[in-house]
Image (tube, rainbow, N blue to C red):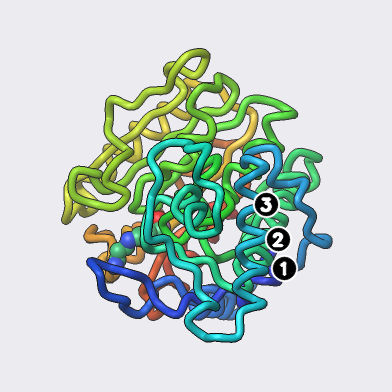
């Protein structure tokens, strides 16, 4: 399988994440990328390449121009800063709604962000754009028919990033970048199996009939992102019926996950898409420090098989997965099953 790497991932190194008023070590760290790459190299059968030089063009289709400019300029502001504390931009104020008076640099940090897990650092913009470019490249290979399955190895993840807000470690929505490009060639389904609801992808396509978004995840009543991912969110306007959520209880294991996965796959099939984007998180694994599910490593092969059996040209985009000891094996199991013939 061809693997498109985010060549800039290591430029984004969160010094920590803010949880309940304290800064704790960041779960989302460069080591995630490294362990996945090492596991795929050890497994064999994967070809690694970098995307062409990043261009903002791949994100303008799905993200607000002012939000893109904010990420670019805030990253540059962090880069220019001398004081180490000023090299990390954290939101402290969250202006409600699009507030025309929220224009200063401090107001924008909260205007374009919805949580305290997603600071802007000197390399954030370059790193996020590198991931989006990798996703765009993968989508182009699939749209051209050059490949059947292409995997995007990137971090930070993307599925929480909305049209004009970062959050949940995510800045640009890589899965949405891929889906948007594929949608030019036919209907697209996004299947998100990260343990957290893909609120950003849902948000971006919520009123569109040409992109179906389906997510299996921890019930937002008890798991991040808390405000989105409930079963009654089914789309709006032309997109009514083109969003499906399958929330599951904390502690979910194979017995509970399997029927939800089957229902999610069935929703994808009914839509009759031409292309699939698989937002692949490994954080539903039993060892994940923040997921709360109890799936064993071998179940990730079952996920991969379910994806393969959908039978569509597929872009696979790396999302979460935070146990550095098991992450590589989970991803390898999933990808090998997708590529099996
Ligand atoms: C990103 B992805 C842990 C709280 C975690 C943010 C979760 C973001 C998950 N201290 N809150 O894997 O979906
Ligand atoms: Zn996640």
CA–CA distance between discs 2 and 3? 32 Å
Q: SS class of the residue under badge 2?
A: strand
The residue at which mark 2 appears reads as: 2
Image coords of residue 173 (percent x, y): 56, 49
Please report contact status of discs 1 and 2: CB closer than 8 Å, yes or no.
Answer: yes
Give the class, few, some or many, for how many residues have Cα within 10 Å of label 3's Cα (few <14, many ≥20): few
Dot 3 beta carbon under 8 Å from ligand 1: no
Give the class, few, some or many, for how many residues have Cα within 10 Å of label 1's Cα (few <14, many ≥20): few
Image coords of residue 46 (percent x, y): 66, 68
Q: SS class of the residue under badge 1?
A: strand
CA–CA distance between discs 3 and 1? 34 Å
Circle nearer the N terminus (2, 3): 2
Up-down relation of residue 189 to residue 173 (above or below): above
The residue at which mark 3 appears reads as: 69
Quadrant of the picture in which ligand 1 is shown: bottom left
The residue at which mark 1 appears reads as: 47
Circle nearer the N terminus (3, 1): 1
In this image, 165 relative to 177: left or right? Answer: left
Q: Tell which of 335 and 229 is nearer to you.
A: 229
CA–CA distance between discs 1 and 2? 5 Å
Residue 82 lies in what quarter of the image? bottom right
Please tell me which residue is depicted at 47% across the width and 43% down the height of the picture.
200
């Amino acid at each position: 399988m061809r693997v498109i790497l985010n060549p800039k991932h290591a430029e984004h190194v969160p010094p920590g994440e803010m949880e309940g008023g304290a800064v704790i070590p960041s779960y989302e760290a460069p080591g995630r990328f490294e362990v996945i790459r090492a596991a795929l190299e050890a497994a064999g059968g994967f070809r690694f390449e970098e995307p062409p030089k990043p261009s903002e063009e791949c994100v303008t289709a799905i993200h607000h121009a002012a939000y893109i400019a904010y990420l670019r300029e805030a990253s540059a502001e962090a880069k220019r800063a001398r004081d180490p504390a000023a090299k990390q931009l954290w939101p402290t104020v969250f202006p409600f709604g699009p507030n025309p008076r929220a224009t200063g640099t401090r107001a924008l940090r909260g205007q374009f962000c919805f949580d305290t897990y997603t600071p802007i650092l000197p390399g954030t913009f370059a790193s996020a754009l590198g991931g989006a470019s990798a996703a765009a490249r993968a989508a182009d290979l699939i749209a051209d028919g050059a490949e059947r399955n292409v995997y995007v190895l990137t971090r930070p993840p993307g599925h929480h990033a909305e049209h004009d807000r970062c959050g949940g470690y995510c800045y640009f929505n890589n899965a949405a970048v891929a889906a948007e490009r594929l949608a030019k060639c036919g209907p697209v389904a996004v299947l998100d199996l990260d343990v957290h609801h893909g609120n950003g992808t849902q948000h971006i396509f919520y009123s569109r009939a040409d992109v179906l978004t389906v997510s299996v995840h921890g019930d937002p009543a008890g798991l991040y992102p808390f405000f989105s991912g409930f079963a009654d969110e089914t789309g709006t306007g032309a997109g009514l019926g083109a969003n499906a959520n399958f929330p599951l209880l904390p502690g979910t294991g194979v017995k509970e996950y399997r029927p939800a996965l089957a229902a999610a796959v069935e929703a994808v099939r009914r839509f009759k898409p031409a292309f699939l984007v698989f937002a692949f998180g490994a954080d539903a694994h039993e060892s994940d420090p923040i997921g709360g599910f109890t799936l064993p490593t071998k179940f990730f092969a079952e996920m991969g098989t379910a994806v393969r059996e959908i039978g569509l040209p597929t872009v696979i985009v790396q999302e979460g997965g935070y146990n550095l000891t098991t992450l590589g094996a989970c991803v390898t199991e999933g990808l090998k099953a997708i590529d099996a013939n």
